[in-house]
Image (cartoon, rainbow, N blue to C red):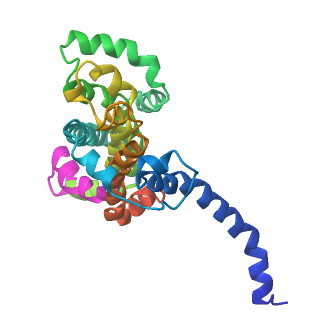
Amino acid sequence: MTRSPWTRALGRLPFYLVVAVIVVYALTPFVWAISTSLKGESELFGAARLIPRDPSLKNYANVLSSAPFMRSLFNSVIVAGGSALTALTAGSLAAYALGRLRFRGKTAMLYAVLAMTMFPQIAVLSGLYVNVRELGLYGTQAALLFAYPLFTLPFATWVLTSFFRGLPREIEEAAVVDGATTAQIFVRILLPLTVPALVTTGLLTFIVSWNEYLFALSFTITNPSAQTVPVAIAQFAGVVEQQEPIAEIMAAAMIVTLPLVLLVLVFQQRIAAGLTAGSVKG
């Protein structure tokens, strides 16, 4: 018996209701943050309104005219970009070894890499703080470039290993027959095939480093010129004395979020391909 379109629509109604609730729950904080960033200080402490009475970009102008904030934005680009590049470079080499080569203890090493991703940041903060001080990196961007691979590199290695495992071994065998070395196989054959995975992993590690707060605060608290945007936003004091810069903090948060949204939009096809590239063995 064929069901009518109305019957099928009613059957799917609970699913769409659940999706609608999830979407509203997820987007409400962002919509409210955008609304707050467009409000003036007088309206900010008045009755709560989702749509501002007199929306203005003044808060964005104040944030963008702040030299410390722009410096912290530049620091975040350097630190997050450097961390992502380091994680991809070292992680792809480690993933190639763990996913394609045969050696004793490979499984134990792979699970050790997975275990490293489970350690909370606070558990390693004290030891890492001592290392940063001993190396003379405290209060610099180099301290963050030294610390961030601690949690981005294991993640990148674990994710990329599954992609390297999924590549057909016949490709390597044909390259060996043609006289290619291990390095040539890795650089010229396997890496181009894993570009979607590299883009996905690189973007995820970039986002993690971009949003990281604990290490950034602990290692740059004495040097504001080396701080990244999460720390700068948390310590934003406004442009006027004795001001509650809630709207400007929201504007700064939106400015910081915009690059991540643009990256996802630009690389969305690569991300979708990367998320499924290792799901089917070639």
- For the C terminus, the image quarter is bottom left
Q: Is residue 186 magenta?
A: yes
- For the N terminus, the image quarter is bottom right
Residue at 39 percent across and 39 percent down: it is 245
Residue at 78 percent across and 86 percent down: it is 6
Residue in the foreground of this view, choosing between 142 and 178:
142
Q: Is residue 33 above or below residue 95?
A: below
Q: Percent from the top left, x then y, of residue 190?
A: 26, 54
Q: Is residue 178 magenta?
A: yes
Residue at 44 percent across and 57 percent down: it is 275
Residue in the foreground of this view, choosing between 179 and 272:
272
Left or right side of 278 for 132: left
Q: Quadrant of residue 216?
A: top left
Look at the image and give the residue range highlighted in magenta.
176-201
Residue in the foreground of this view, choosing between 185 and 73:
73
Q: Percent from the top left, x then y, of residue 55?
A: 41, 61
Left or right side of 151 for 77: left
Asked whether the viewer can see residue 7, the reply is yes
Q: Percent from the top left, x then y, of residue 132?
A: 25, 16
Most extreme residue toward the right, as rendered?
1
